[in-house]
Image: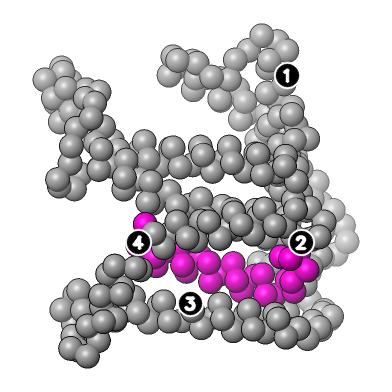
Amino acid sequence: MGYGISSLTRQAGGRGVVGRLDARVKIIGLLCVSVYAVALDSAVALLVLFAVSWILACVERVGWAKLRLLVFLVGLTVWGTMFSQSIFYFEEPRTVLVTLVSPETPLIGGWTGGISIYREGFRHGAVQSLRFASMMTFGFLFCWSTGPGKMLSGMLQLRVPYVLAFMTVTAVRFIPAVMDEFATVILAMRMRGGKIFSLNPARLLANWLKLIRPVFINCYRRSNILSLSIQSRAFQPAAARTTAEGGRFTRGEKVLLTAVLLSTAALVLLKILHGLYLWDILYVSRLRLIYEISRLYL
């Protein structure tokens, strides 16, 4: 179990189409995808973005074990977002599916005004969850297809501050170790007859506190060892250092990078124009088609 979970963030070897791309192209593409996930509002557009992420993950040949675990994490994220939005949805109209706490319930009913699950909240949560699910899939795909050395080199070539690039790569490399720690503690708890999940909220909280405490302590120890190792080597973040110049982009990479940047710039421009129209700041009658496209498809 431990190795299966931690393998989710380990590099898959870069054998697929994405793995052969220059690290700089993938970093810029990931930034553009984050803009898509934030700027898009249409359920169809977000679904297309999510579908593209999974198509790339499948053609990258990362292995069925990684895809299976990613399906679990994405499903958990989607369900959690939908369920939370179904409870905390306050827009109108809204249709009550199930009433969890009636307004007439003593104490909690008066404090909350009643707690219900709304059908429109499920729909809203499903759309919002596509943002998280798409970014999660693209992020794991980037980790799978890019080694730590290439990741660091690509960020430095893009003029990312060395400290930020170093911390990012270190954090990515520590994720599998943290997952292994969780898996080890869970296995130890099960061998002693402990349970992770419980229908009793108080017991569930106590179980998770028992799970998190040793993991947190081990992470603290690892961070101390890493900091001492860095200091013993007289590491200076501000010191001058040479960086290998990146190779030239291939023709396909140039075309891909240009298309991604142009589409991102066009999306941002269309959303800005549509926002100015909605806020009654600027309206141009000749741009009615753009307003309609932004409202229906973006």
Residue located beneath label 3 in the image = 264
Element under label 1?
Answer: helix
Residue 29's image quarter?
Answer: bottom right
* Neighbours of disc 4 within 10 Å: few (<14), some (14-19), many (20+): some
Range of magenta residues: 16-43
Residue 276 seen from this side: no
Q: How many marks?
A: 4
The residue wearing badge 4 is 42
18 relative position to 72: left or right: right
Q: How is the image coloured?
A: one colour
Q: Height in image: 123 above or below 60?
A: above
Disc 4 versus disc 1: distance between alpha carbons? 46 Å
Query: In the image, which disc is placed on residue 188?
Result: 1
Q: Is residue 30 visible?
A: yes
Q: Earlier in the sequence, mark 1 or mark 3?
A: 1
Give whichever of discs 2 and 3 has the lower sequence position.
2
Which is in the foreground here, disc 1 or disc 3?
A: 3
- Using the numbered discs, state the Cα–Cα distance from disc 2 to disc 1 in whole angstroms: 37 Å
Q: Position of residue 187 (x, y in %)?
A: 72, 21
Name the residue beneath numbered marker 2.
Answer: 16
Mark 4 vs mark 2: which is more N-terminal?
Answer: 2
Q: Quadrant of the N terminus?
A: top right
